[in-house]
Image (tube, rainbow, N blue to C red):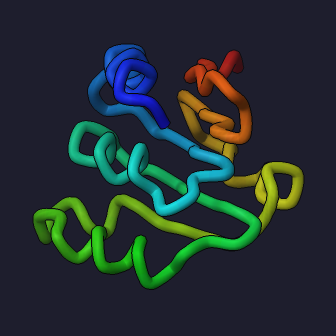
Amino acid sequence: MHARAHVQVRAAVPPGSRLVEWYAGVGVLGLSLVPGCEWVRCSDVNPPRAAFEASRAMLAAEVRGRISYLVGSAAERIDDALGADIYIDTNTKSPTPHRHIP
């Protein structure tokens, strides 16, 4: 993800959000947002689990438990969005946070 898009996404995610990131790749976006979120759920069809876990291990201990990473496409992981405030589908050229509308 380009740095400018990353900054825009960060600005659009309010503190305390519950966030889902589909097609998360190595999880850079979710990992960078989790300190300000209640929880983050990442997924991808072929996740680089070792890279994600190595980065997750560098988070503060009190933050690590608030982020998860599971295997699957957005369609397969749609239930991850239950209870989410924001979802991000990074399988697009311009990832944009979308707010959940109850």
The spot of residue 40 in percent (x, y) is 45, 50
Q: Residue furthest right?
A: 75
**Residue at 60% of width from left, 27% of height from top?**
95
Q: Position of residue 56 (x, y in %)?
A: 29, 70
Indicate the quadrant where residue 72 lies.
bottom right
Q: Is residue 16 above or below residue 42?
A: above
> How many numbered discs, if any?
0
Q: Is 5 located above or below residue 16 in the figure?
A: above
Which residue of the protein is positioned furthest toward the front in this rendering? 2
Q: Position of residue 54 (x, y in %)?
A: 30, 79
Q: Residue at x 37, y 19 (%)?
A: 4
Vertical arrangement, residue 23 with respect to residue 54, above or below: above
Task: State left or right for residue 4 relative to residue 41.
Answer: left
Image x and y of residue 70, in percent: 62, 71
Residue found 53% across the figure and 55% down from its top: 41
Relative depth, front residue between 91 and 31: 91
Q: Residue at x 28, y 69 (%)?
A: 55
- Name the image quarter holding residue 67: bottom left
Instruction: Check the image and report above or below for 10 versus 43.
Output: above
Q: Quadrant of the C terminus?
A: top right
Quadrant of the image occupied by residue 100: top right
